[in-house]
Image (spheres, grey):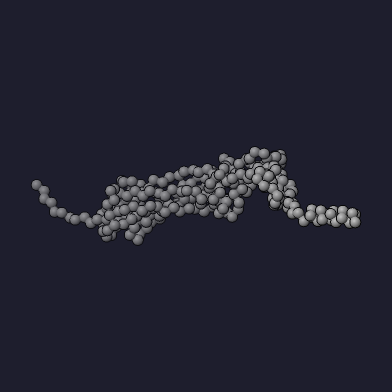
Amino acid sequence: MKLRVVFLALSVALLSIVLVDGPAIAACDWVREVRVVNGMVHVHFEYRCSETSEGTTGADEETASQPTSGYEPPRDSGWDAVCVRSAIAAGVGPASFCDIPSAPGVVSVATPVVAPSVTAGIAGKAFRNLALPASSLEVQPPNGQTLVNFDTNFFTRQGQFTRTVRLLGQRVDLKVWPSQYRWVFGDGESLASESAGAPYPDLVITHDYRSKGGVRPRVDTTYSAQFRVNGGAWRDVDGTVTIPGDPVDLRVRTATPVLVGYN
């Protein structure tokens, strides 16, 4: 009788142990990650778990949800803004397209990596993402007034400039200049030219208005560019970019002849 009671008690105890909910076991493993930073391959390992144990709370839960080694991936705040926009336009991730800043705790492997080539197409995407300036239109006669059947003079002063960006981890200089202008006179007429015009007395770009009234002329600028990588030779960029100009207010008036006498 005593043996039966003891056996029954042990069976109940074992059953109780089995029925107690134990903590979920998370699947953990070492994960190998490889990054290319400044032309070098960097390898590091992180111990990651697919889920957190249900029994952990507070500080234990926070510790269990974090990798035991490694570092947070670098944010894009250190990358060139033009490069990030160009990477998105090209349909690739900025991390594989732009210059990645180094981070602490990286185990470097001294394996040289051939720098990827910056092509004319890649430079063209960066060129199209630049904040290019609109040309400012100047009109003579000044003060926003001109006359019917008068050679109204137009010109602008936009010249060549350079911009520097980082693409595929390399320094890329872009030399940009206006290659064509489209003069929109506001009365339905327009003119394309390579000249930026000139102030009086060099009348290069002129227009005769046939009727009086208010018009809003402007000049649209088409930019071309060349690029060089790490101070190398200049090469042509694929494509051009046209920036519309801001219109100006111009009043076209008629001249009234007046008979005057001479002594």
- The answer to whether one can see residue 229 in this image is no
Camera-nearest residue between 246 and 51: 51
Quadrant of residue 66 in the image? top right
Camera-nearest residue between 154 and 55: 55
Farthest-out residue, front: 1
Q: Specify whether 43 is left or right of 192.
A: right
What residue is rendered at 45% in x and 53% in y?
A: 242
Camera-nearest residue between 19 and 256: 19
- The answer to whether one can see residue 69 in this image is yes
Camera-nearest residue between 251 and 201: 251
The quadrant of the rendering that contains the N terminus is: bottom right
- Residue 220 at what x, y percent from top left? 41, 53
What residue is rendered at 34% in x and 58% in y?
A: 186
Farthest-out residue, left: 263
What residue is rendered at 63% in x and 40% in y?
A: 103
- Residue 93 at what x, y percent from top left? 60, 51
What residue is rendered at 68% in x and 40% in y?
A: 106
Quadrant of residue 182 in the image? bottom left
- Residue 65 at what x, y percent from top left? 67, 47
- Residue 112 at what x, y percent from top left? 69, 41
Q: Specify whether 257 is left or right of 100.
A: left
Total numbered circles: 0
Q: Specify whether 21 is left or right of 190.
A: right
Quadrant of residue 62 in the image? top right
